[in-house]
Image (spheres, grey):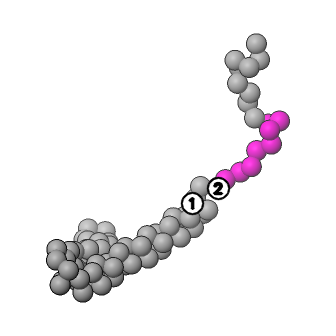
Amino acid sequence: TVIQFSLKDRKTWRAFECGSTLLPMVYEERRQLIQLYEVFVFIYLDLLVQRKVFERLEDKYLVHVDVDANDLISDISKQV
């Protein structure tokens, strides 16, 4: 079972069941694999969305600045 949690408000969480499946143990139950694949697809797509959100937050709050090699502090052990 896959359950997704989100904040309802500052003090309360909300939980949604996003998918549930059984792992087939015999060949005759192979149709259950479709549900298993659907759960994997849901998880994969949700991870892609999370990655995009993280990248947007990273761009907004963790600004990357390119620094010229001449402006870097050199390793003191290399100066000897």
Residue 15 seen by the camera: no
Q: Give the residue at x 24% y 86%.
A: 31
Q: Tag 2: residue type?
A: Val
Query: In the rendered view, does 78 fall on the left or right side of 11?
Result: right
Q: Tag 1: residue type?
A: Glu
Residue 76's disc number: none
Image height of 78 relative to 26, above or below: above
Q: Nearer the viewer, residue 30 or 54?
A: 30
Q: Give the residue at x 80% y 42%.
A: 68
Mark 2 neighbour density, 10 Å: few (under 14) some (14–19) many (20 or more):
few
- Tell me the SS state at disc 2: loop
- Tell me the SS state at disc 1: helix
Quadrant location of residue 62?
Answer: bottom right
Q: Position of residue 51 (x, y in %)?
A: 50, 67
Residue 68 within the magenta-colored segment of the rendering: yes
Query: In the rendered view, does 78 fall on the left or right side of 38?
Result: right
Image height of 34 relative to 53, above or below: below
Q: Nearer the viewer, residue 16 or 42?
A: 42
Query: In the rendered view, does 65 fall on the left or right side of 11?
Result: right
Residue 2 within the magenta-colored segment of the rendering: no
Q: Nearer the viewer, residue 20 or 73?
A: 20
Residue 63's disc number: 2
Quadrant containing the N terminus in the rendered view: bottom left
Q: Earlier in the sequence, mark 1 or mark 2?
A: 1
Residue at mark 1 to residue at mark 2: CA–CA distance = 7 Å
Quadrant containing the C terminus in the rendered view: top right
Q: Which residues are the magenta region?
A: 63-71
Q: Position of residue 43 (x, y in %)?
A: 37, 73
Extreme-bottom residue of the structure: 31
> Which residue is label 1 attached to?
58
